[in-house]
Image (cartoon, coloured by chain):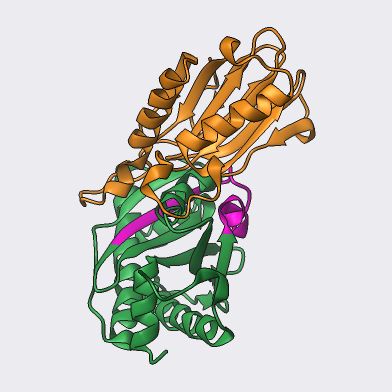
Chain colours: A green, B orange
Amino acid sequence: MSKINLEELSDMQFDILKEIGNIGAGNATTALAKMLQMKMDMSVPKVALLPFKDISQLIGSEDQIVVGILLDMGGEINGMMMFLFDTKSAHHLVNKLMMQEDVVDDYATDFTEMEMSAISEIGNIVSGSYLTALASLTNLKVQASVPSLTVDMIGALMSVPASEFGKYGDKLLLIQSQFGEEGYVNGYFMLIPELESYDKILSALGM
Amino acid sequence: MNINSMIKVGMGDLKACKSPEVLTTLGLGSCVGVALYDPVTKVSGLLHCMLPDSKQFKNASNVAKYADTGLVELVNQMEKLGANKTRLVAKIAGGAQMFSTNTNNENLKVGQRNVMAVKMKLSEMRIKLLAEDTGLNFGRTVEFYSETGKYKIKAVGKPEKLI
C-alpha cells in the first residue's frame, strides 16, 4: 500500500515534484535544442492533480489532434512518460531535423513513414535525457521502453494513462512541462509515475 | 445540430436524456462509449467507461468509471426519465489500442478488455447489442441522437460513420 495520499499532498511535496519536472524537462529541452540547433524555452512545470474529465483540457479540447509519443517506464520507477506536440510543431521539428522546407499545409495530420521514425527518434533522445536526469537526481534506476507514436485526438491519447491511474482513484497526478519556441514549436512533457513510484521518488529525495 | 445543445459526457462519466437531446463524448481512446436507448420513449443514455471491472479495485467510488457498475447506474438514471429496461438496446464504440508497444504492459490492452466487459454486462442485463465500432488503433468522437437512435462516429482522417 502506498504511503502517498493524492488528495493530501503537502506544498513541500508539490514543490519537489515540480523541481523534478524542472530538471527533467530542462535536460530534455536542452537535448532537443542541441539536436535541432535551435533555441528553445521551457515554462515552469505544473504538477497537477486532475479529475479525469479535465485532463485533456490541460492542453486544449479533447478532440484536438496531436502527435503523442508514449514510453513505458520500468526499473525502480514505474509509470509512463508522454510527449505531446501539436501537428504543426511536429511538422516543424521533423522538417528541421530532416532539413526539409516547411510546407504551407503544416496542419496536415499525416506524416510519411520516414517522418514518423524521425519523430520517434526525437522522442527517444528527449525522453532519454529526461529520465537520465530523473535517475541521477533520485539515484533510482529507470528504464524506458521503445517509444510508441500515435497521431490522434488528445482525449484518446490521454485515456491510456488515465485508465492506468483509474485503478487508484478518480484523479490523475502528473508533472507537466511545456517547451518550445513561441509560434514555432509547442510541446508538452508529461511524467506520470505510478503511485508507489511517487513514494519512491519522494523518499529518495528525503521526504 | 448545434454543438452547444449537446450534452457532453466526460471520461469516467455518464448522462441520461430525453429526445431530442444529443449526447456526445470527445476523443474516446481505450475507453468505451456505451449508448443505451429505449426506442419507444426515446430516453437515451451514454456511458464513458474507462476500466472493465469494479470488483478488481477496492476504492471503486465513481461507478461511471467501470463497465459493470456504470451500466447499472445508467439504466437506473434512464428508468427515472421513463425508460423501460426491457426495451433497452445498445450501441457501443471505442476500446481502441492507442499505442502499439512491445512491452508486456497489460494496461495497454485495456481497450480490448473494456469492450469484452461491456458485452458481458449487456448480455447479463439482457440488453441487446445492435451495433458496434470498436477496437483497432484510433480514437473516436461519438454523438448519440436520441430522436433517431443513431450513433455517429468520427475519427481522424476517416469518413463519418452512422451506426
Q: Which residue is drawn at 65% across and 9% down?
A: B39
Q: Which residue is drawn at 33% across and 68% down?
A: A127
Q: In this view, does B106 lie to the left or right of A10?
A: left
The N terminus of chain B - image quarter: top right
Image spot of residue A182 (x, y percent): 61, 68
Q: In this view, does A11 lie to the left or right of B107?
A: right
Q: Which residue is drawn at 29% across and 72% down?
A: A77
Image spot of residue B101 (x, y percent): 25, 48
- Tell me if residue B70 can be seen: yes
Q: Residue furthest bottom?
A: A206
Q: In this view, does A66 lie to the left or right of A198?
A: right
Q: In this view, does B43 lie to the left or right of A168?
A: right
Image spot of residue A46 (x, y percent): 56, 73
Q: Residue furthest top?
A: B40
First to last magenta residue range: A51-72
Q: Residue at x 49, y 77 (%)?
A: A39
Residue A180 lies, with reference to residue B29, above or below; the image says below
- Tell me if residue A176 can be seen: no
Residue A187 lies, with reference to residue A142, above or below; the image says above
Tell which of A94 and B66 is nearer to you.
B66
Q: In which quarter of the image is residue A147?
A: bottom left
Q: How many marks?
A: 0
- Magenta segment includes A204: no
Image spot of residue A172 (x, y percent): 51, 61
Residue A34 lies, with reference to residue B127, above or below; the image says below
Tell which of A56 and A181 is nearer to you.
A56
